């Protein structure tokens, strides 16, 4: 189309529109009202007829109505031109978060046609409290977290706008946390700031209260419970329940006997707080053969033969360790004192002994020296020895402990008894007495203390005359209680007596057997 033709067309269009306006007599006007939200149904919004200067007497004939709006009209216009509220308006529902909430409607007055545009601004009312999406939230923070660490929280929501929206956050008073607030796209965002280090062993959790406050007068608020769970770090060593441990154990206690139980606790949690027990590295193999420790219970148990005579006291270092990734350990000394039992009988040793003593020995002559030992201690090792009363010997203590002398207590007579079995009895002083016996044989050696004795005294013999010279006439016999050489007898005839000199000159005697021979024939 040529430029001139286009202008002509626009001119004709403008004329046409003017003709239509004149034909239908259309007029328009613009009105603006402001109402607060939450007004009651039926409340007057405004008098449109009055505000437009219309003739109210002719309104009923002409017809006055609203021709635009929602399917459920918010407003109602009566024939008098008064605009009423048809239902309660919730600004947050109608306008959501728009700062200025305006509802536009179009009213029509007929015969002739008049169109009037009405703008209604819905003013915000502080009818909502700030709310959090949850009533309670849980945070897990390690006790190793350093001061200055920050933890963003989910903010509260308030549908109200501007000054009636959330203006500030407050945190309940506490020692460890402070509150910071930063601005975000959707409003203010609360941030939890760690002010002081956490210690799980002091407090396992912390309960905080976050409060969101709007700008209304009076202000409305909402709260969020914050529970901070402190996560454990292996920062505590096991601690033994007692400063020192001591136990008393009887020797010869059966294998498996529980001596005592040590106990340690660790304030940490989980594996960091689980304690296991063991021997310290400096415990030698000898002790490990005698004792063992239960890793879980801390019980110290007899594993081998406990002998007081081998050792009467043991000192063992027990280690308590946690199960953390890098275990922490504590050591404690345990002293075990062994109690002696009377399990050793006295031992008798003859250190010097004369197997034979002369029978003429004086009373108090030492026959033997004995040594007595008992490996037990105390009364269990205290030994008393004696010899039975029916022998001619006695036991005399020596100046040296547990040494005794066996001595004669009266004269001996070999011819009466040539051998004695002397039994030494030694008993300890234990509650259950143990005793030992040792017998030595003492031989009494002979002394020539007995003279020979003839079997008959005097002898009377009869001889026949005419005997053969040199033949045995008769025999005499003597005996001696001594022995050996002391008992050898030699016979001879005493020839120095005057009376017997004549007779003895005719006789001779065999010195060895006592046979008497005639030197001549008798008549």
Image (spheres, grey):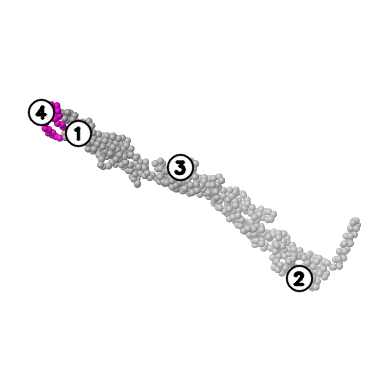
Circle 1 sits on which residue?
480
Image coordinates of residue 454 in percent, x first then y, are 16, 34
Foreground disc of the pair 1, 4: 4
Mark 4 / mark 3, whichever is N-terminal: 3
Circle 3 sits on which residue?
289
Circle 2 sits on which residue?
78
Circle 4 sits on which residue?
466
The alpha-carbon separation of the residues under discs 1 and 2 comes to 177 Å
Q: Residue furthest left?
A: 523
Q: Quadrant of the C terminus?
A: top left
* Depth check, front residue: 352 or 488: 488
The alpha-carbon separation of the residues under discs 4 and 3 comes to 104 Å
Mark 2 / mark 4, whichever is N-terminal: 2
Q: Quadrant of the N terminus?
A: bottom right
The alpha-carbon separation of the residues under discs 3 and 2 comes to 109 Å
Mark 3 / mark 1, whichever is N-terminal: 3
Mark 3 / mark 2, whichever is N-terminal: 2
* Depth check, front residue: 21 or 480: 480
Task: Please report the bounds of the magenta region as a residue range.
Answer: 456-481
């Amino acid at each position: 189309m040529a430029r001139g033709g286009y202008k002509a067309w626009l001119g004709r269009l403008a004329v046409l529109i003017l003709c239509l306006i004149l034909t239908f007599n259309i007029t328009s006007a613009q009105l603006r009202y402001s109402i607060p939200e939450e007004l009651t149904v039926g409340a007057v919004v405004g008098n449109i007829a009055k505000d437009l200067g219309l003739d109210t007497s002719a309104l009923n004939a002409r017809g006055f109505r609203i021709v635009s709006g929602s399917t459920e009209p918010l407003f109602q216009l009566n024939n008098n031109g008064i605009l009423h509220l048809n239902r309660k308006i919730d600004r947050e529902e109608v306008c959501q978060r728009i700062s200025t909430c305006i509802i536009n409607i179009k009213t029509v007055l007929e015969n002739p046609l008049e169109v009037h545009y009405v703008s209604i601004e819905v003013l915000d009312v502080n009818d909502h409290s700030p709310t959090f999406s949850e009533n309670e939230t849980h945070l897990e923070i390690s006790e190793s977290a350093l001061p200055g660490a920050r933890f963003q929280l989910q903010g509260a929501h308030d549908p109200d706008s501007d000054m009636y929206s959330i203006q500030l956050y407050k945190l309940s008073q506490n020692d460890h946390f402070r509150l910071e607030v930063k601005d975000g796209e959707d409003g203010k965002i609360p941030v939890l700031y760690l002010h002081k280090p956490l210690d799980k062993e002091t407090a396992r959790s912390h309960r905080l209260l976050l409060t969101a406050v709007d700008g209304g007068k009076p202000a409305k608020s909402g709260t969020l419970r914050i529970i901070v769970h402190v996560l454990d770090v292996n920062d505590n060593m096991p601690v033994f329940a007692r400063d020192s441990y001591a136990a008393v154990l009887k020797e010869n206690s059966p294998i498996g006997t529980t001596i005592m139980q040590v106990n340690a606790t660790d304030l940490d949690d989980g594996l960091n707080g689980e304690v296991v027990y063991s021997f310290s590295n400096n415990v030698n193999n000898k002790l490990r053969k005698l004792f063992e420790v239960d890793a879980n219970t801390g019980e110290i148990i007899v594993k081998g033969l406990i002998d007081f005579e081998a050792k009467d006291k043991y000192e063992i270092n027990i280690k308590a360790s946690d199960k953390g990734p890098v275990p922490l350990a504590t050591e404690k000394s345990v002293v075990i004192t062994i109690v002696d039992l009377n399990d050793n009988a006295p031992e008798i040793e003859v250190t010097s002994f004369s197997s034979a003593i002369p029978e003429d020995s004086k009373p108090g002559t030492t026959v033997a020296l004995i040594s007595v030992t008992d490996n037990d201690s105390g009364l269990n090792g205290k030994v008393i020895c004696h010899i039975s009363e029916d022998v001619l010997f006695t036991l005399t203590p020596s100046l040296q402990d547990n040494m005794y002398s066996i001595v004669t207590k009266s004269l001996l007579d070999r011819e009466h008894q040539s051998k004695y079995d002397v039994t030494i009895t030694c008993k300890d002083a234990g509650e259950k007495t143990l005793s030992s016996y040792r017998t030595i044989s003492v031989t009494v050696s002979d002394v020539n203390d007995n003279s020979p004795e003839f079997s008959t005294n005097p002898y009377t013999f009869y001889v026949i005359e005419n005997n053969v010279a040199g033949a045995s006439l008769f025999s005499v016999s003597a005996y001696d209680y001594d022995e050996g050489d002391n008992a050898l007898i030699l016979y001879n005839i005493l020839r120095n007596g005057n009376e017997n000199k004549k007779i003895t000159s005719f006789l001779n005697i065999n010195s060895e057997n006592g046979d008497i021979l005639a030197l001549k024939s008798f008549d």
